[in-house]
Image: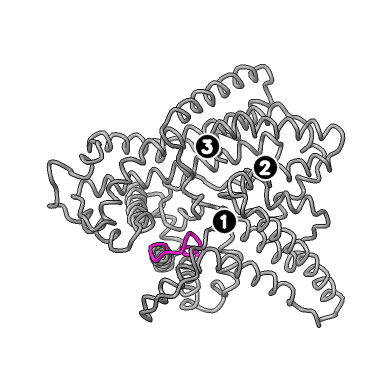
Amino acid sequence: MLFTTVTFICYFLPIVWAGFFVVARFSNKAAAFWLFAASVFFYGYWMPEFTLLLLASITGNYLIGAKIALAADAVLRGQLARKKGWLVLGVVANLVLLSYFKYANFFIDNLNTVLGESWSIGKVILPIGISFFTFTQIAYLVDTWQKGVREHNPVHYGLFVTYFPHLIAGPVLHHSQMMPQFRQADTYRFDAGNLIAGLCIFALGLFKKIVLADGISPYADPIFQAADAGLVPDMQEAWLGALAYTFQLYFDFSGYSDMAIGLSWMFNVRLPFNFNSPYKATNISDFWRRWHMTLSQFLRDYLYIALGGNRHGVVRRYVNLMATMVLGGLWHGASWSFIVWGFLHGLYLGVNHAFRALCGERLLKQLATNRLFTLAAWLLTMLAVVVAWVVFRAETLPGALRMLQSMANLTLTTPEHIYLWNAGLNLQTGMWWCGVLAVLAFVAPGSNNIGNQLLKVNHDRPAVRPFVLGVALAAVAVLLVVNATRKSVSAFIYFNF
């Protein structure tokens, strides 16, 4: 069930929202169960065949979490025999489940290529959202052992995992971010300010997805498809395809993140921000502090630091950094393209850390005040990001290589721009599209700041609420009509991961 459809906006959302606050008038526990049940239905509507898998994963992790808590408490009392056995079992079980559904076919296909065999296990279908609900629960198990996290309410735990605004494409949640909210009485009381601000941010995300991301996507798809098919686009087509995808992914993921935040505000729940104008970053480390922020934090806290971080010398630090980013690339999908994309970002981060170490803090502070240096750093960061996105988007590594070769070959131009022409598209129109989206991505204020201002205004000035509510409802209605009149409705890109 997509956030952009009539089914979700006109039926699911109002029924679940109204039911939540009506039930909460009688029982907060019942309201939490209502939201949990609605979230399971939301998932089952999309993939009913995997609903039992989701529930089994939740049940298993909840029970293992309880065992880990008992073992951790025993260790605190000096009873070392149990140690980390339950934690290891829980983490391994989650990774085995994820690996089977996400990587089994990839492993068999590559093994067949190397050995010249034709083994087959059939087509393993990827359950939607499995990467997110698996990582969320791994974080819970580790935090139960390391940080003393405890959860005794199975409904709250189930809601923590399945909560529908984040279930399919994030953010990756931590227990400490959500559980206190489910226990607070204020969460179950209607708040007009939260509702209206949430609806506004939801409308903004809807606009980003339906108008901006879906609007630019036709200029990316035919170019990449041609390259993957063995054809060679000209230089201008290749750059247009690369930039179009760069902005399509930006506004697609930003739109989903806004909608998830806005939906949660309607239920008086705060999700962590997951997107913060990453194309304004002036170095690759800053980019990763802004792009898919919760995944970056997960990889840092539960993989990079677990591997040793920077505690074992410079060489080990760079090895850990590269391993983290390669595995982060593999998390996105079972493809060599994702592995190479992760390798590129590991290389970028290594170069960035080496440059900072070479300069020293004093010189870096001086350079940060130099506008020319800042502009050059931003341009270099964006170039690195665009190159990596080409590898990320291409279905094959040869296709990505053809795209990059065409982008670098300034003499490879044709007046016809045949692959755009075949798709009924115009180069100049695509470049204008990219120019407009560049201004929005590079200059416009971030939606996180806009959302916080909307919350403040709607709480501090109740008189403006009717006007703001009317504008938000009108915007959602118009965007819904636009989306409903299209021949097909596109899913969010991160649903694939």
Q: Quadrant of the N terminus?
A: top right
- Name the residue at 74% across, 77% down: 85
Vertical order, 153 against 218 (above or below): below
Q: Secondary structure at mark 2?
A: loop
Pointer 1 residue = 127
- Name the residue at 24% across, 49% down: 238
- Name the residue at 14% across, 41% down: 416
Q: Amino acid at mark 2?
A: Arg
Q: Nearer the viewer, residue 115 or 315?
A: 115
Mark 2 or 3, nearer chain start = 2
| Label 2 Cα neighbours within 10 Å, binned few <14 / some 14-19 / many ≥20 | some
Pointer 2 residue = 270
Q: Amino acid at mark 3?
A: Ser
Range drawn in magenta: 328-338
Q: Quadrant of residue 7?
A: top right
Pointer 3 residue = 447
